[in-house]
Image (tube, rainbow, N blue to C red):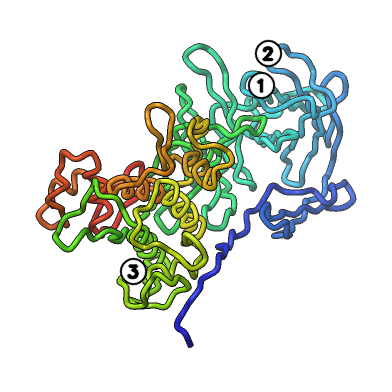
Amino acid sequence: RCGDTNKTDYTEPAGHKPGDWIIDKEPTTDSEGSKHKECTVCGGKLETQPIEKIYNSATTDSKGEAVVGGYLVTVTDTDTKNPVANAAVALHKDNSISIRLPNSRLLDYADQTTVTVQLVKDKSAVPDMSIAVTDKNDNYASGKTDKAGQITVPTGSGKTNEDGKVTTGYEDADGDRWTLTVKVIRTDTKRPISGSAVSIGKTGNITVKLPDGTDLDAKHQVTVIVTDHKKAPQQGKNVAVKGDLGQSAAGKTDKNGELTVPEVEQTERHGVYIVGYTDGTFGPSRSMTRSEAAAIFARLLAEKNGDTISTAANTKFADIPAHAWYSGYVKYLSNNGITYGKSKTIFAPNDAITRAEFTTMAVRFFDVYGDGDAEIMEQFSGFNDVSSGYWAAEYIKYAALHGWINGYGDGSFHADREINCAEVVTIVNRLLGREADEDYIADNLRKLNTFPDVTKRHWAYYAVMEAANAHTAVLGESESWSK
């Protein structure tokens, strides 16, 4: 009835993220086994699949040999020719062979594994037989035996298995050999894409050729995950993904070893949050009042929430008339737990806001606003004039850790000093991760809101232009504008 509204915090659904297969029952020669995948977010079971029964299985002996069906399978270290004992060898219904290396050995391009297949009866080589090799880290490599009945894994290329994985490697210019496991999945469903051809060049660049019929566009993104054979994410790897219709996209893996392509342009609307004074000026060196600061944060939060702020409102503060231009802004922030007074009943709307007071309001605003630039600045060590017992010490530390505020050259902060309008817009832009598009401003200056007392030579010119002009921001390494 009173017209007040409040929007509480909420969490967007994370969506299911399938993990690797979990073996529930190992297959035997008498019965099939089973496996399932669980969501790494909620732990729920997503899917279950049977594992075909083993038609013949064995474990390599001290000579690296095992007999399955009529085949003698020998597993050795490629360079030393030493036998690999305790490898599990299985012959499948389709006459293919799978080998799981012992826990002491991984698929490694710097320490390759050779598998030799011969007929037991006459020791003759068995060419063109499909071999798949895995290890305890679920690395995977496969191929077909050559004329000598041999296959060496991993190599510089391969195709992804049912889990979307393949392990490959390359040798760099210094002669060092590196192993990479590449996983290819659908970005939206997290489902693996099997049959993707993966190859690695001499410089370590990765090429992924998607199987025929696999879409690659803005609505069908593909994520490539690159790790080493010990599961460590590989950042900064160049990856090119190609589709069967000539589509292609490329980029570098992030800190998690992931790249999603094609990149979808992200945009957000940046509204105006400063309007200047009635005489048309901005007053960059002018101290900002507490009511003016409240208006800035209220406009930003209301725009994000889609709320309308009343132009007049009764507040709990005795010194704010209901008809004051700022009463609705103070009321809105108070309802959202952001603003505060000098006391329970005094707001002091016309007092100049101090650096400490503004920083406190900014941090409280950020907690409610819910996004922006939250990167931690690890190098921050504190200000020499802000003691741990100061009332706003924790707010100042939080803002400094995120790079929203800076001190002075002598290491001080001057918490009780009044903050001016130019400093305010600079801090707010940092907090929200907003930055001006200098080229757009130069080309469209006549269409934009400007202030006669903030020229291009002013240190805060672009920060003010960002705050005073509504625009659609195209997000990337830097922000670009479109109206």
Q: Position of residue 422 (x, y in %)?
A: 27, 46
Residue 23 in the image: above or below residue 306: above
Q: Nearer the viewer, mark 3 or mark 1?
A: 3
Which amino acid type is shown beneath numbered disc 2?
Asp
The furthest residue to the right: 30
- Under mark 1, the amino acid is Gln
Q: Position of residue 149 (x, y in %)?
A: 69, 25
Name which residue type carries label 3: Tyr
**Residue occupying the point 32% across, 43% down:** 478
Secondary-structure class at tag 2: loop
Q: In the image, what residue occupies the spot 58% across and 30% down?
A: 180
Q: Residues within 10 Å of mark 1 (few under 14, many from 20)?
A: some
Residue marked by disc 1? 112
Give residue 326's mark: 3
From the viewer's perspective, is residue 88 above or below residue 316?
above
- Does any portion of residue 213 appear in the rendered image? no
